[in-house]
Image (tube, rainbow, N blue to C red):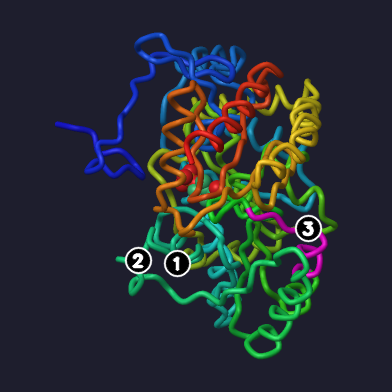
């Protein structure tokens, strides 16, 4: 049997590289080549590969407890995650629901929001999402996310979503106005809005400012719309704060967490919500319970890894490293502008720009060419179409950062 890899066109004979081990910002291949992981292995790895504290914790927990049923039973690692995570979140977040991937954390958020209204006897099942957004590859995630070549075969199966425009620089007011008009017209049907705060990741690393979130939130509250933030990518320091919503003045009703939750070690996800949401399911009527579970809900080993990760965040100034990385990025903006790159931008751990191009979609060849050039030179970056971005683990050394940026420069000059 052969392995069918994700987001891979095997028909193009893309090479598949076997990794033997990993450490800090490096992936180390079977043949001993060291590759700098410039995208944190698709955004999961925050602290660095094989963080020793997390590794130890996993080893210890594996001897104590593997998966157990989580309906009617609980365990210390899960209780500890709830307790430790609450130290990083406003008190209004009173409940945590575990699942096992970013996509499922979004499905859970959508089901919580729609179920909330249903249990209150309200027919408000419409979801609002943003243009260019990405919320995962399951059906609810695909429906909420941007429609593209990624999900075209499934278009007819995806539920309708009200879409607000991306607040591009200078167009922020248009987005707010669009949402206001939408609520005036259809407010009574709308159950929830789900957003990637500050950065639309997979959609192309598009940024927008915190005040837009503040304004969309105010409008949502006026119309009784549940405000859900998908912090699957932005959570755990990516935007320069622990969570992206820390840069706003709002208190979301629901947030989705996954990628950085275990520091990039084992899959785990959490959907965190307020008492108001939870209470809508609290009843002596069984039919009102929240009908959702994953078999591996709150896996004890994964929860222990999350606890270790949260403890590291508690005891160390991780954001100082994010700042160090961003300070370096600031010194690179002019350089990439001078290379002819467009929209050179940075936020927290993210540096992104567009290279000159003729076509503008994900399948365009520019990204593939650059990917191959970077990889042959010991750097893993996976451009999104003609958008090149860097998002390394926070432990990356200054030397490795320099190397990534030097390879990007020669890549732009030589590969294009
Ligand atoms: C990656 C991502 C998801 C999906 O997470 P998976 O763990 O891949 O299912 C959802 N939302 C956002 C914003 C993401 O970046």
* Residue projecting furthest to the top: 32
Please name the residue shown 46% across and 41% down the image: 297
Residue where numbered disc 2 is placed:
152
Callouts 3 and 2 close, C-beta under 8 Å:
no
Crowding at dot 3, Cα within 10 Å, few <14 / some 14-19 / many 20+, comes out as: some
Q: Read off the magenta span.
A: 206-217
Percent across and percent down for residue 161 are 51, 74
Q: Is residue 237 above or below residue 315?
A: below
Snapshot quadrant of residue 262: top right
Q: Are marks 3 and 1 in contact (CB under 8 Å)?
A: no
Choose between 84 and 204: the one closer to the eye. 204
Name the residue beneath numbered marker 3.
209
Q: Residue at x 51, y 25 (%)?
A: 379
- The question of residue 399 being in magenta is answered with no
Could you give the CA–CA distance between mark 3 and mark 2, rounded to whole angstroms? 30 Å
Q: Is residue 302 above or below residue 128?
A: above
């Amino acid at each position: 049997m052969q392995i069918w890899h994700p987001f891979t066109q095997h028909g193009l004979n893309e090479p598949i590289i076997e990794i033997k081990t990993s450490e800090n910002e490096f992936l180390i291949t079977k043949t001993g080549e060291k590759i700098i992981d410039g995208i944190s292995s698709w955004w999961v790895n925050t602290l660095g590969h094989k963080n020793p504290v997390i590794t130890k914790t996993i080893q210890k927990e594996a001897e104590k407890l593997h998966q157990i049923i989580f309906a009617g039973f609980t365990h210390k690692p899960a209780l500890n995650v709830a307790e430790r995570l609450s130290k990083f979140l406003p008190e209004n977040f009173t409940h945590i629901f575990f699942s096992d991937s970013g996509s499922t954390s979004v499905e859970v958020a959508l089901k919580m929001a729609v179920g909330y209204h249903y249990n209150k006897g309200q027919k408000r099942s419409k979801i609002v999402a943003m243009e260019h957004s990405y919320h995962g590859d399951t059906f609810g995630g695909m429906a909420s996310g941007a429609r593209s070549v990624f999900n075209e075969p499934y278009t007819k199966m995806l539920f309708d979503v009200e879409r607000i425009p991306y607040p591009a620089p200078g167009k922020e007011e248009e987005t707010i106005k669009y949402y206001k008009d939408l609520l005036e017209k259809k407010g009574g049907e709308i159950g929830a809005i789900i957003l990637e705060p500050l950065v639309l990741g997979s959609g192309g690393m598009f940024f927008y400012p915190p005040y837009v979130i503040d304004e969309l939130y105010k409008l949502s509250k006026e119309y009784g719309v549940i405000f859900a933030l998908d912090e699957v990518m932005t959570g755990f320091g990516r935007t320069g704060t622990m969570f992206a919503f820390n840069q706003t003045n709002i208190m979301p009703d629901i947030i989705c967490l996954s990628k950085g939750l275990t520091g990039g070690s084992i899959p785990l996800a959490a959907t965190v919500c307020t008492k108001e949401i939870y209470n809508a399911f609290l009843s002596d009527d069984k039919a009102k319970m929240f009908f959702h579970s994953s078999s591996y809900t709150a896996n004890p080993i994964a929860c222990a890894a999350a606890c270790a990760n949260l403890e590291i965040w508690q005891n160390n100034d991780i954001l100082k490293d994010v700042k160090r990385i961003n300070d370096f990025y600031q010194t690179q903006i002019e350089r990439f502008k001078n290379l002819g790159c467009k929209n050179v931008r940075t936020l927290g751990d993210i540096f992104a720009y567009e290279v000159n191009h003729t076509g503008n979609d994900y399948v365009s060849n520019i990204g593939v060419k650059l990917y191959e050039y970077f990889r042959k030179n010991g750097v893993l970056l996976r451009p999104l179409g003609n958008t090149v971005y860097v998002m390394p683990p926070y432990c990356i050394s200054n030397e490795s950062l320099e190397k990534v940026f030097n390879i990007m420069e020669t890549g732009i000059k030589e590969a294009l």
